[in-house]
Amino acid sequence: MTRKEKDHLGELELPDEAYYGIQTLRAVRNFPVSGLRSPPELVRAYVILKKAAAMANMRLGDLDLERGKAITEAADIVFAGWHMDQFVVDVFQAGAGTSFNMNVNEVLANIALERLGRSKGDYGHLSPNDHLNLSQSTNDTYPTAAHMAIIDLSEGLAKVLEDLHSALESKSSEFNSVHKSGRTHLMDALPVTLGQEFEAYAAAVRRARSRIEQRCDDLLEVPLGGTATGTGANSRPEYRGEVIAIVSALTGRKYRPALDSFEALQSRAQMVAYSSSLRELALELVRIANDIRLLGSGPTAGLAEIELPAVQPGSSIMPGKVNPVMAECLDMIGFQVIGSDTVVMLAGQAGQLELNVMAPSMAFNVLLSQRLLVNFIPVFTERCVRGIVADEARCKGYLEYNPILATLLTSRIGYLKAADLADEARRTGQPILRLAVQAGIISKEEADRLFDPEGMTRVRFL
């Protein structure tokens, strides 16, 4: 069973069961690129926006109650998860997202027509353009829906980052008395505690989360109501305030109109800034994951100061091998987020005159980054961080034979003599404490006080 639909380019035949229409079909044929479709978060955001537009147009008297109610009911049906397979436009599509906007318009129009007891494609009665797109343009609705979808996912990201921060804080407390050699340039340095290292990781996650939240707030300013070029053409002066107020009521978030509607269509700087905050998070997560891999390296030929949970065999050929697979996966996700941010950055500068048409690529990459992080950070937290165990004996052994402890004697014997003592410790394999006592530099009692691990790792500027 098929039906025919017509647009100004001609007539096409569609499967009768399809809720999408002729413009969607043209886009499917034009852009068989990746097989990837728009994320469900973007679909849900768009249908909320279409519901809000219908409600605003009804209140302003531009849309009759019968059609308006059918449109809002159709939006509710899709938001509940029905007909998600009808959003078939590839994520790599016509600039600005016109194809996806029309995909949404056609699906909602045909669901609404069925609610009214009419056939799909009866656009003379309820049109994807005249009614679903009333007072709107792709140019103001697509970036608005993208902001809404990003904000929606950001709440989940904030939660998983808080859980990761909490797990790292817990390990910091657990490892607070595990004294060890610090390392700078990957070489022995003055002592720290394993807890201090993990506290720094927790602080980095907290700071990254704060930056994400700050830039997320900026996304609450939306270009909705600017229509095609920022003038609000084909909409009432009251429409912008009305529709944004309804979107805010439907979502429970305080969206606000763009301070400059022309800039809001020309520039996608808000999305670029948010994406950069994800990149900053990714860089910190990669750094932390690599530290964890290094601290857990071994078990006999590496640092082995911590032991990571064994979650799966590490080799198809070497029996008993266990690898830091959770940290490795976090690295790969971090690299993908950084790569996605590069796409967003390039797309952000590609706007021309009254519009940046690269919004679909930007939205896809930001939402992909968020989804990867939201999906895996909880797994990394539970299956890696929470199960880390310290090897206190290994940490203590490294610290005892650390020649850089000679630094603590510089106030007594000077830098050069302390350096000679450090060289002797390296040559002989003797601890600095023992050499200093043997050389008569300090007494055994003084050495015990000076080289007390608790004292050596005390934070002195608090």
Image (cartoon, rainbow, N blue to C red):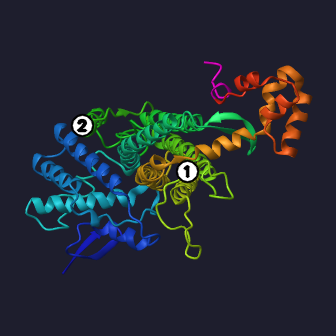
Position in image of residue 350 (x %, y %): 57, 50
Image quadrant in which the N terminus is located: bottom left
Residue situated in front as seen by the camera: 338 or 61? 338
Q: Where is 13 relative to 264, above or below?
A: below
Cα distance in 3D space between marks 2 and 1: 32 Å
Q: Residue at x 72, y 39 (%)?
A: 400
Q: Which residue is mark 2?
A: 246
Quadrant of the image occupied by residue 101: bottom left
Q: Where is 242 relative to 411, above or below?
A: below
Q: Which residues are magenta?
A: 454-462
Q: Which mark is residue 201?
A: none
Image quadrant in which the C terminus is located: top right
Answer with left or right where residue 59 lies relative to residue 327.
Answer: left
Position in image of residue 104 (x %, y %): 29, 58
Q: Tell me the crowding category of disc 2: few under 14, some 14 to 19, or many 20 or more residues within 10 angstroms, Cα based.
A: some
| N-terminal-most mark, 2 or 1 | 2
* Residue farthest bottom in this picture: 1
At label 1, the amino acid type is Asp
* Residue farthest left in this picture: 117
Q: Residue at x 35, y 53 (%)?
A: 42
Q: Where is 179 relative to 339, above or below?
A: above
Q: Which residue is mark 1?
A: 341
Q: Tell me the crowding category of disc 1: few under 14, some 14 to 19, or many 20 or more residues within 10 angstroms, Cα based.
A: many
User: Disc 2 or disc 1, which is closer to the eye?
Assistant: 1
